[in-house]
């Protein structure tokens, strides 16, 4: 049995020890520099509010598991979880509207919740000023975790199965041999280990640096204060219960509240980000009992106190009696960080975890360690999700500070970062700027969402009958009707898309064929010039990615993927006779698609581009004019045409060459919004949004890309004899032309929530919004559903797939 050392006995380390020992890994030693179990880490100070609802399905599932687990823990001191319920209130119209969206997430992820009138809010929480409250969202299963008690109770469970906890033992470093951990170094000597898990809280980044890992987290101070006695609370709560009123969020003013007997605790996110300088903290806090507590900065709290007294007027007769600035981790995207070090096997991290998600993260980590794959999709939390561009100290500090500022903000799903822009630009950037590109950011790349240069064209098309349904203000943000025209022109004429940000690798070497056969579901061992759409599965048959594999030479492949996690997955399995190289930035790509694409490109090329000579899903290395290019006859938008790749230095010339050649065909440059709606029309999925490792190919409608008659590949065994899926990804089409969806909306059949939307886009071809939704497997074309978009229910029907061009006549001609 493997020996496990866990660094840190906070809520994460203790929960992990429990989850590991419950799975039979009973040789677990948990080391902490502090005393047990009020170690002095963040857990020791957490007021323990657990609001389960999160935009992320995974984070919500982690929170649900935490609540279920903590509810069942026993501790002689009393409860580990007190399900007082959660109440979020709105004091602005915008927040009130947004609570509907939040209620939608709760419904979609299976968390009970209800929107309340102001009177109902006050009935639940009588300290509220009725005049200020416009409405609320109540989640009865939310509540308070007693974090140290929950840690201790889980630790006891782990100890009863053989785990050991050692206080006052600082881990100084990791011992390794041949790329594997063999133990950890402490002041008392070496503790042997086959597996080391870093659950060191906000100290984790500093620690992991010692083994060459960048953990993008920033320790931030956050203010928490307790008042003196509040008259109306006196005698309300027994000493044991501590609280009876729901935990309360006042997100419009960055505040949260809970009861401590007859006092109120107030958490404040309204202050400037206060990142903690770790080297100073480590020096100053050596040997201190509570090293995650900093002195209270009173001035930062003054506005919060005024706001708190306005919302809860009874506070006005009291004052702050105890307060501190507590430290915990923020990450660039708000997600935790989980996974195993790629270059040091056996070294794992479970970092930047709130109490709220702690047991869920611990369970998934334990499954990952013991079974090889977590049962929940964890890609949002994956240690290797960060692009290189996102791993600089400057990027981590800037984006994590932004995450602190935005923690209670209403964040639009299409909202993009404004700081640190312009880091990755394609060679077409200047031309795109000239065309009035409205850029947003993804993976560090500047990506045109639409082009203002197409404004006049759009107006002309709309005045000649192209429909442009009214959108509400929310759906109009980061959006333009020009995108409708761009999509329409792609279907009618021809358009150029900047595909440079599509991540691509060169995989080469004598073992490349067998490697790719082993890694992917489809047969890639076809002739030179073949292109194959195929899947990467995990061992349990879950979809890790969907990729295209172009065989450019006998042992050279160009592989286009979805995220840095694909690089990580391939790299972990890479044999010695295969090389894997990211060629994204060294190359560029333009998608030229539309019925006129061939007429536009053929004159530039001496090779025959006819359908007979250059077939669908084939690759060709040739020249356009004087420029060496690789053309793939692939189209995510579902039109005739090619992805045209070139070495980056040719990019500017290639764009001009194509754009000039296209003038007589009415070519336009088109952006990501058009691109997205066209791929949804065509039935193409987007990994990470429509399907994840939670789903198997058949359920996601991707069984066609799996060759069960092929020799072994990762995930094949799990698919063999797999039971029928309970849910399926379906296309749905809204009845009303004005109805929209943005993703993550709950889908109802009658009054029952039966699924959720993943992605959506307005289809100019049918004049309706089309969406993907996960629905019960029995859902059939024509079934009528209702989608809850921010509180308004819109009719939609299940539609056969694809909605546009099911015969493939547009694409294969
Ligand atoms: P910690 O509890 O910090 O545990 C890490 C442990 O590692 C520590 O005990 C430390 O001593 C030990 N350690 C570190 N380095 C070493 C080493 N080299 N060797 C040995 N041991 C080491 N979360 C919520 O969900 N809800 C809330 O309402 C909430 N409110 C909060 C309010 C405040 C004021 C603060 C500070 C945090 C709050 N949080 C809340 C966040 C939450 O407390 C933390 O995210 C969580 O406790 C982190 O748990 P952890 O186990 O990862 O880290
Ligand atoms: N282009 C290339 N690679 C990619 C993408 C791309 N890799 C990542 C991501 N996008 C993968 N997604 C898709 C989805 C669908 C298709 C291509 C890439 C596609 N599907 C055909 C179909 O379903 O009809 C496959 C037909 C077949 O298997 O023959 O074209 O945009 N280069």
Image (tube, helix red, strand yellow):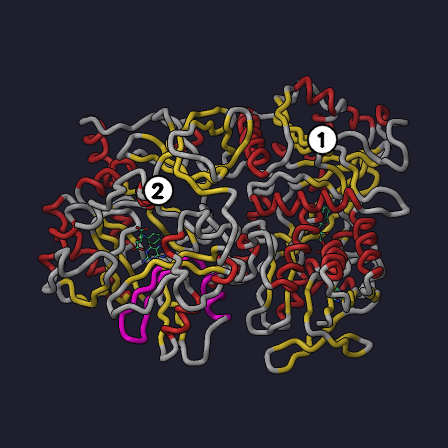
Location of residue 104 by image quarter: top right
Counting residues from the start of the chain, the first of labels 1 and 2 encountered is: 1
Is 481 on the left-hand or right-hand side of 85? Answer: left
- For disc 1, the neighbor class at 10 Å (few under 14, some 14 to 19, many from 20) is many
Q: Position of residue 288 (x, y in %)?
A: 82, 61
Q: Position of residue 439 (x, y in %)?
A: 36, 46
Residue 561 part of the magenta segment: yes
SS at circle 1: helix
Q: Is residue 281 above or below residue 51?
A: below
Q: Which residue is drawn at 28% across and 32% down?
A: 766
SS at circle 2: helix
Label of residue 680 in the image? 2
The residue segment tinted magenta is 548-572
Q: Residue furthest front?
A: 721
Judge: label 2 CB < 8 Å from ligand 2: no
Q: Position of residue 732 (x, y in %)?
A: 39, 34
Residue bearing the label numbered 1: 308
| Foreground residue among 222 and 187 | 187
Residue 418 visible in this rendered orientation of the protein: no
Q: Quadrant of ligand 2?
A: bottom left
């Amino acid at each position: 049995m493997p020996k496990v050392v866990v660094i840190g006995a906070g809520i994460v380390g203790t929960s992990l020890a429990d989850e590991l020992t419950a799975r039979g890994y009973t040789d677990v030693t948990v080391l902490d520099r502090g005393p047990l179990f009020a170690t002095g880490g963040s857990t020791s100070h957490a007021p323990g509010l657990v609001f389960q609802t999160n935009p992320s399905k995974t984070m919500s599932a982690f929170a649900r598991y935490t609540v279920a687990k903590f509810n069942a823990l026993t501790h002689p001191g009393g409860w580990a979880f007190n399900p007082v319920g959660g109440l979020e209130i709105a004091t602005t119209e915008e927040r009130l509207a947004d609570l509907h969206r939040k209620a939608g997430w709760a419904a979609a992820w299976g968390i009970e919740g209800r929107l309340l009138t102001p009177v109902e809010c006050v009935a639940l929480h009588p300290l509220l000023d009725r005049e200020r409250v416009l409405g609320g969202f109540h989640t009865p299963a939310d509540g308070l975790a007693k974090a140290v008690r929950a840690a201790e109770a889980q630790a006891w469970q782990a100890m009863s199965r053989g785990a050991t906890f050692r206080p006052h033992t600082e881990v100084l470093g990791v011992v390794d041999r041949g790329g594997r951990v063999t133990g950890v170094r402490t002041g008392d000597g070496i503790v042997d280990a086959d597996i080391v898990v870093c659950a060191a809280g906000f100290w984790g980044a500093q620690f992991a640096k010692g083994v060459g890992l960048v953990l993008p987290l920033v320790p931030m101070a956050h203010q928490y204060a307790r008042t003196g006695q509040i008259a109306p609370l006196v005698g309300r709560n027994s000493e044991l219960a501590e609280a009876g009123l729901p935990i309360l969020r006042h997100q419009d003013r960055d505040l949260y509240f809970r009861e401590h007997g007859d006092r109120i605790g107030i958490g404040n996110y309204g202050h400037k980000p206060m990142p903690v300088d770790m080297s100073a903290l480590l020096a100053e806090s050596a040997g201190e009992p509570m090293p995650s507590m900093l002195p209270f900065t009173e001035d930062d709290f003054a506005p919060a106190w005024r706001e708190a007294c306005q919302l809860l007027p009874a506070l006005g007769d009291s004052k702050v009696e105890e307060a501190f600035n507590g430290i915990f981790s923020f990450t660039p995207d708000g997600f935790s960080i989980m996974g195993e070090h790629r270059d040091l096997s056996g070294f794992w991290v479970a970092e930047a975890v709130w109490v709220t998600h702690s047991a869920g993260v611990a369970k998934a980590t334990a499954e990952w360690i013991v079974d090889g794959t977590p049962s929940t999709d964890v890609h949002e939390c994956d240690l290797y999700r960060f692009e290189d561009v996102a791993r600089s100290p400057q990027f981590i500090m800037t984006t994590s500070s932004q995450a602190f500022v935005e923690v209670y903000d209403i964040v639009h799903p299409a909202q993009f970062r404004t700081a640190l822009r312009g880091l990755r630009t394609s060679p077409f950037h200047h031309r795109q700027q000239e065309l009035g590109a409205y850029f947003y950011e993804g993976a560090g790349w500047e990506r045109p969402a639409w082009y203002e240069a197409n404004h006049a064209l759009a107006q002309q098309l709309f005045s000649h009958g192209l429909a442009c349904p009214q959108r509400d203000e929310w759906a109009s943000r980061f959006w333009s009707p020009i995108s409708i025209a761009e999509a329409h022109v792609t279907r009618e004429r021809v358009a150029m898309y900047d595909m440079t940000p599509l991540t691509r690798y060169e995989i080469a070497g004598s073992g490349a064929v067998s490697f790719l056969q082993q890694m992917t579901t489809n047969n890639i061992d076809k002739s030179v010039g073949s292109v194959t759409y195929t899947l990467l599965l995990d061992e349990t048959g879950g979809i890790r990615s969907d990729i295209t594999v172009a065989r450019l030479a006998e042992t050279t492949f160009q592989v286009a993927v979805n995220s840095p996690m694909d690089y990580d997955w391939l790299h972990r399995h890479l044999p010695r006779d295969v090389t894997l190289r990211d060629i994204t930035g060294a190359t560029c790509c333009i998608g030229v698609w539309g019925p006129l694409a061939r007429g536009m490109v053929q004159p530039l090329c001496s090779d025959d581009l006819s359908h007979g000579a250059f077939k669908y899903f084939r690759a060709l290395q040739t020249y356009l004019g004087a420029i060496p290019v690789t053309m793939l006859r692939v189209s995510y938008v579902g039109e005739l045409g090619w992805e045209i790749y070139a070495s980056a230095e040719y990019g500017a010339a290639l764009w001009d060459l194509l754009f000039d050649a296209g003038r007589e065909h009415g070519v336009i440059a088109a952006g990501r919004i058009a691109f997205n709606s066209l791929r949804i029309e065509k039935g193409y999925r987007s990994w990470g949004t429509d399907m994840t490792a939670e789903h198997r190919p058949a359920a996601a409608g991707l069984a066609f890309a799996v060759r069960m008659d092929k020799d072994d590949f990762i995930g094949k065994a799990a698919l063999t004899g797999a039971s029928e899926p309970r849910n399926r990804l379906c296309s749905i089409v809204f009845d009303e032309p004005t109805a929209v969806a943005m993703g993550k909306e709950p889908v109802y059949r009658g009054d029952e929530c039966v699924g959720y939307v993943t992605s959506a886009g307005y289809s100019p071809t049918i004049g309706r919004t089309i969406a993907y939704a996960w629905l019960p497997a029995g859902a059939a074309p024509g079934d009528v559903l209702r989608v809850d978009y921010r509180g308004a229910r819109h009719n939609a029907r299940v539609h056969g797939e694809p909605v546009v061009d099911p015969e493939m006549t547009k694409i294969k001609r």
